Image (tube, rainbow, N blue to C red):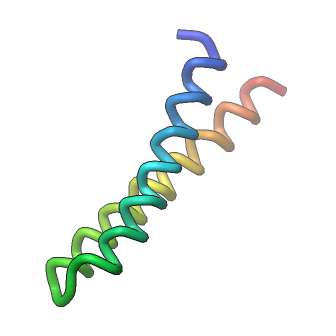
Amino acid sequence: MDNTMVKALLWMLLAASVAANGLLSSALDGVFQVLLSVVAGAVGLTAIAGLVAVKRSAS
């Protein structure tokens, strides 16, 4: 898999996690919303870390 595909996948994952986090905060309430929001945040942070790692390996 080349870097272009990996970057595209990571950007899509980041966008999906941000969108999911926004939808979860408006649609749900309580502990379940907090847990799903934490999971979406962790996925977003992992996607960001992956994008940074891909950029550093390309340099």
Taking 19 as reference, is 59 above or below it?
above
Q: Relative to residue 56, is residue 23 drawn left or right?
A: left
Q: Quadrant of the C terminus?
A: top right
Between residue 58 and residue 40, name the one nearer to us.
40
For residue 16, side relative to residue 30 (left or right)? right
Question: Toward the viewer: 59 or 23?
Answer: 23
Q: Residue furthest top?
A: 1
On the picture, is 1 further left or further right than 17?
right
Estimate the x, y position of residue 22 in percent, counting from the top left.
42, 70
In the rendered image, the residue lying farthest to the front is 27
Residue beneath the point at 44% across and 59% down = 19
Q: Which residue corresponds to the image point at 65% horizontal and 19% vertical from the top-left?
A: 4
- Determine the residue located farthest toward the bottom in the rendered image: 30
x and y, in percent, of residue 18 in the image: 48, 60
Residue 53 sits above or below residue 27 on the image: above
Which one is nearer the viewer's eye here, 9 or 2?
9
Residue pictured at 77% horizontal, 24% vertical: 58
Q: Looking at the image, which residue is at 46% across and 42% down?
A: 13
Q: How many marks?
A: 0
| Residue 53 in which image quadrant | top right
Image spot of residue 56 (x, y percent): 75, 35
